[in-house]
Amino acid sequence: MTLLNTLKTIVFLSIILYFAPFLVENIKNQYTSLLEPPTHIGVVHITEPIHSAHYLVSELHSFFQNPTIKGIVIKIDCLGTAPGTSQTIFHDIRQLKKEYPKPIISLIENTCLAGAYLIASACDYIVAPESSIIGNIGQSFSDWATQKIPEEANHSFDAIKNDAYQQLTKQIALSRKLSLSTINNWANGKIFTATQAMTLGLINEIGSLHTVIKIIKEKVLIEGDIEWVQKKHTCPYQNLIQKIIQS
């Protein structure tokens, strides 16, 4: 090999070495989505008063037990739920978190009141925009009991109401790490904007879905895209209804 050819080879290799990092970075940016599959995050919706925990609990169990689901988001826009239903979901979330550790975040849009807030409090983190309405803690049982408890049992209503209120506030205080001595500040059926709720410790952060994504990526340690996974509810009488329509 002549000296000229040697110099040409050296220059050529130098050019390749100079541009190699840029080429590698460019290839990585273009094909990361193919090389790194998106992270699956389960989404559960609470958009109306719930009087049965069945569907929601089934979704939560499915998402927690599925190893491909790395986190869960509960989107809430609800005025309240039946007290027993909200407590059932509350206990399931707390137990599932112990058995299958993965982040679960509540994202509130407009309202999260009474039993709906109890469910949110079981999550690791609560995010809401500034003007969303939060609270009414302690009111759900009163509303429900007024409709459900027979008149002849009204003599024991106050005792039942007080016991249920104590249960609810203790559960929320435990989940949100609030002092029971401050109950009068955040319970007793009081309602707050998200900004006020954050100063009381009822939510963690003012924000939106973008905030939730940021938190999930930090907790799950992911850099790629997120793929939202949602369950499709099927009416238990769907087959029967279909047969009636076709007949």
Image (tube, helix red, strand yellow):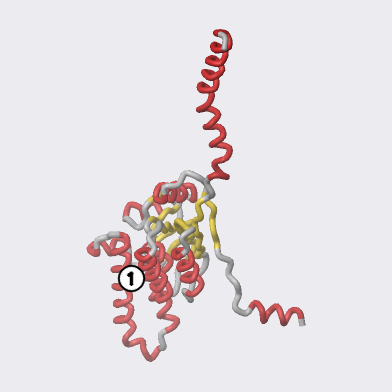
Apparent side of residue 31 relative to residue 216 in the rendered image (left or right): right
Q: Residue at x 29, y 60 (%)?
A: 185
Q: Within 10 Å of the Cα at label 1, are there few (<14), some (14-19), or many (20+) other Cα atoms?
A: many
Work out whether 92 lies above or below 8: below
Give the number of marks: 1
Q: Is residue 75 visible?
A: yes
Residue 37 or residue 56, whichever sits in front: 37
Q: Residue at x 48, y 61 (%)?
A: 76
Residue 157 or residue 91, whichever sits in front: 91
The picture places residue 150, in percent across and down from the top left corner, at: 41, 88
Q: Amino acid at mark 1?
A: Leu
Q: Element under label 1?
A: helix
Give the residue at the far right of this rendering: 247
Give the residue at the far bottom of this rendering: 152
Give the residue at the far left of this rendering: 181
The picture places residue 86, in percent across and down from the top left corner, at: 41, 71
Residue 91 or residue 110, whichever sits in front: 91
The picture places residue 135, in percent across and down from the top left corner, at: 39, 62
Task: Indicate the quadrant containing the C terminus: top left, top right, bottom left or bottom right.
Answer: bottom right
Q: Residue at x 35, y 58 (%)?
A: 202
Q: Is residue 136 visible?
A: no
- Mark 1 — residue? 168
Work out whether 18 lies above or below 81: above
Work out whether 22 lies above or below 230: above
Q: Residue at x 51, y 55 (%)?
A: 40
Give the residue at the far front of this rendering: 1
Task: Indicate the quadrant containing the N terminus: top left, top right, bottom left or bottom right.
Answer: top right
The picture places residue 28, in percent across and down from the top left corner, at: 54, 36
